[in-house]
Amino acid sequence: MDLLRSLGTTARHFAAPLLIAALTGGAAFAQSPATDAKRIVSVGGTVTEVLYALGQDPRIAAVDTTSVFPAATANKPNVGYIRQLSAEGVLSQKPDLIIAEAGAGPADALAILKASGVPFVTIPTPPQAEAVPDKIRAVGAAVGKAEEAETLARAVDGELAAVKARIAALTVPKKRVLFALSLANGRVMAAGADTSADAIIRLAGGVNAAASVSGYKPLSDEAVIAAAPEVVLVMNGGAMHMTAEQAFALPALQASPAGKAKAFIAMDGLYLLGLGPRTARAALDLAAQLYPDAVKP
C-alpha cells in the first residue's frame, strides 16, 4: 500500500481497486469504475478479439497493431505496437479504461499510464490453451460483462474439449513440428516449451520439435538437425514472415525430413498463436494440414 500513498488523490481513487484486485485475484473488478468505461484502449490482439466477441466494440476507442481481427479493427485509431507503446499516444485517445495483455511495454510507458489516473487492467496470457476461458472471463470482468463472458468462455471450453477428443482419437503417427518465428544471422528463432506455439502444436496433435528449449530461442544447425522436424510452421504476413524458400535454403532444414518433403505450413499469426476465442478452430485447421487424410477442417 506504500505505492498508493505515493500517488496523488486522483490516482489513488482509480489505482486502489486495481491494486486490491491484483492482491486478491481480481475480486475488486466488480466495484471498479472502469466497468462502465465508454472509451477503452485495447492493447493486444486477443483482448480486442474478445471485446468484439462480447459485443463491446462500440466502447473501443483505439487498438494496437496486433489487433487485426475482426477486420473492423482497421477502422479504429491505432496506438502502435504492443511492446512499443507511447504513453502520450495512448492518453491522446482520452481513454477511461486501458486493457492490455501481459507483456505490453515498454516499462516506462506503462509506468506513466498506470500513474495517469486512467484505470489500467492487465490480462494474463499464460501459454496454455486451457487458459483461454479464464482470459475471456478476465476481459469480461474488466468491462462489466461477466455474464456474457461466462457464456462465451463455456462455449470456447466446449470447443476445446471437442477438438482434444477428436485429436486423441487419431491413429496416425504424430508429426514433429518446428515453429520458426524468424531467421536471424542464419539461425532459426524457434518456439520451445512454454510458448503459445507449443500449445497450439500440441492441441493440433503434433509434437513440438524444439520442446527441449524454453521460450523462443535461436537454434544452432546441430540443434535443428537433432530436432528432425517433419513440418516447418510459420506465421504468414508481417515483417517476420518466412517463406518456404528461405527456410529450406538453410542446410540444416534442407536436410531435415521437412526439407526433403518440402512440408511447410503458414497460418495467420493471431489466429494461430493468439490463444483466444478461435483457438479450437485454429488447432483443427492446423491438424487438417498436418494430417490431411485423417482430419477435415
Image: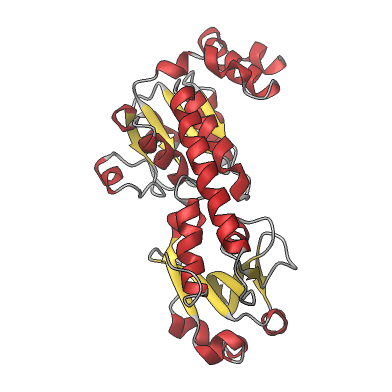
In the picture as drawn, the residue positioned furthest to the left comes out as 75
- Report the front residue among 165 and 28: 165
Image label count: 0
181 horizontally vs 214: left or right = left
- Name the residue at 51% across, 86% down: 248
Here the colouring is secondary structure
Question: Can residue 200 be seen at all in this image of the molecule?
Answer: no
From the top left corner, tell me how far across and down residue 77 is, in percent: 29, 39
- Name the residue at 62% across, 80% down: 229
Q: In the picture, residue 92 is in which quadrant?
A: top left
Question: Can residue 199 be seen at all in this image of the molecule?
Answer: yes
In the picture as drawn, the residue positioned furthest to the right comes out as 212
102 horizontally vs 35: left or right = right
- Name the residue at 59% across, 59% down: 203
In the rendered image, the vertical position of residue 212 relative to residue 128, given as above or below: below
- Report the front residue among 219 and 108: 219
From the top left corner, tell me how far across and down residue 234 is, in percent: 49, 70
From the top left corner, tell me how far across and down residue 245 is, in percent: 44, 85
Which quadrant would the C terminus be assigned to in this image?
Answer: bottom left
Which quadrant would the N terminus be assigned to in this image?
Answer: top right
In the rendered image, the vertical position of residue 179 relative to residue 107, given as above or below: below
From the top left corner, tell me how far across and down residue 158 is, in percent: 53, 44
- Report the front residue among 279 and 61: 279
